[in-house]
Image: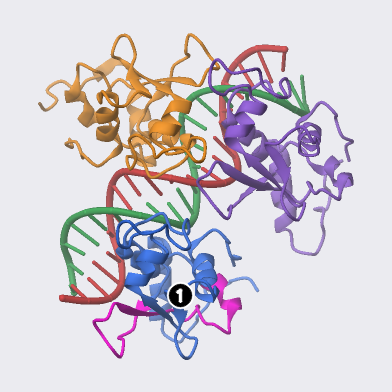
Chain colours: A blue, B purple, C orange, D green, E red
DNA sequence: GGCGTTCTAGAATATTCGTAG
DNA sequence: GCTACGAATATTCTAGAACGC
């Protein structure tokens, strides 16, 4: 029931993957997942890279300097890693059912998984087919 | 249903942002929000700045000396912060639906949110479309 | 019952106030509180300052760029503001009973106040005089 | 009662670290 | 080795509360 907070992670990620000037984050061939080139990502968005090099191309998007923290965010928002066809090349492939190129409307469902939300979600998924909605739920 | 008190915060803010001699407060590109340069604001309007420096350029508008108090005022009047494109440079971007360059008529709706007013407003926003006022509402 | 995490706020603060090269954070005359010069702090530790100026003198201590966030940390760790003799000059005075120049041993008691801890603390403080310090308390 | 100022706290997201699986 | 998650701290934005006028 939430709208999209333009300052939070999902909106940032959406802008990055759709930005022509960002080359380290792209859609996969089907537009159903993210392809991330780690070394390039670190230079372009985390401001790492070889010392004595210029500033990051798109700074200020994340405050972190570690790729692992970025991955933590992906997991917190429900993304899962997909095995890449060519492993070991600094290429990462992540997916979420609510992050698709042709479905910007689903973006609002990408919500941070707190402990409570996670429990609720797990409960729903394990329910027998009886009643997906709690009794007396509105609408 | 109120008119604009020329001594209160909204009117002061309106005069500042439209004053050619004030450089720390400006309209954003669309005229829908405020851009505030904090260091300049502190010198120009709060009279801070390096000691041994001249007097503030536009003194007497606020009694406070802290930028935080100014931000408190903005929030009390319903402004919300917007992520600036380049964070971390002392640049702040605030918006309110009732503060627009081409709509001075809306200024009268910028009212201080007391606890009572805030509660009333929240109630209205959550009401189903049935009846804006609960039956038997007072007044 | 915890020891001091050298990466967390209290240890950082201790190092800053005792560092000869940091000039924006000092002990007050009695060594019982902190004196903080905001403008200098922002240049020296937050990396703000006039654009086109050199890098911060002691960067990397905090990730934030806002003095308000630093104050939030102080409050989270139980510091309280003390009225300065000379208000309005960007000088802040903060105290905590567990932050004293001659009592580094107390530093371990400076703990982050979560909601639970805060409630427990308030309950203890409202206890009748029966047993303020539990007799036979450990250590 | 309203408004301005100050200090502190609530709540949500972000970041880091450790570790279970 | 690797992925995902829990938990603690850090950061941000906004609100509560108290006080004076």
At which x and y percent is residue B73? Answer: 66, 34
Left or right: C6, with B35 as reference point: left
Q: Residue furthest front?
A: A52
Note whether residue B5 is visible: yes
Picture layout, residue C21 above or below residue D12: above
Q: Is residue B138 visible?
A: no
Coordinates of residue B136 in the picture (x, y in percent): 84, 49
In the image: residue A41, left or right of residue B64:
left
Nearer-the-camera pick, B35 or E6: B35
Q: Nearer the viewer, residue B53 or A123?
A: B53
Residue C62 position, x and y percent, is 36, 41
**B15 vs B131, nearest the viewer:** B15
Q: Which one is in front, B82 or B22?
A: B22
Residue extending farthest left = C139
Which quarter shows the N terminus of chain C? Answer: top left
Residue B9, x across and y down, in percent: 75, 31
For the residue carrying disc 1, how many other residues have a C-alpha within 10 Å: few (<14), some (14-19), or many (20+)? some
Quadrant hosting residue B4: top right
Residue A44 in the figure: left or right of residue B31:
left
> Magenta stretch: residue A105 in it?
yes
Which residue occupies 51% across, 65% down? A12
- Residue that label 1 marks: A23
Q: Is residue B135 above or below residue E10?
A: below
Residue drawn where x is 48% and y is 14% of the image: C83
The residue drawn where x is 29% and y is 24% is C17
Q: Chain of mark 1?
A: A
Q: Is residue A94 above or below residue A115?
A: below
Residue A54: say if magenta. no
Stretch of the chain drawn in magenta = A80-109
Q: Is residue B96 left or right of residue C16?
A: right
Number of numbered discs: 1
Q: Dot 1: what SS?
A: loop
């Amino acid at each position: 029931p939430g709208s999209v907070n333009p300052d939070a992670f999902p909106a940032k990620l959406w802008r990055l993957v759709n930005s022509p000037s960002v080359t380290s984050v792209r859609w996969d061939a089907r537009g159903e997942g993210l392809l991330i080139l780690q070394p390039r990502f670190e230079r372009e968005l985390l401001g790492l890279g070889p010392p004595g090099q210029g500033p990051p191309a798109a700074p200020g998007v994340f405050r972190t300097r570690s790729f692992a923290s970025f991955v933590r965010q992906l997991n917190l928002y429900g993304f899962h890693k997909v095995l890449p066809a060519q492993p070991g090349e600094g290429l990462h492939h992540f997916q979420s059912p609510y992050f698709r190129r042709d479905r910007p409307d689903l973006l609002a469902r990408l919500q941070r998984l707190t402990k409570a939300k996670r429990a609720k979600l797990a409960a729903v998924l394990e329910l027998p087919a009886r009643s997906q909605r709690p009794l007396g739920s509105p609408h």
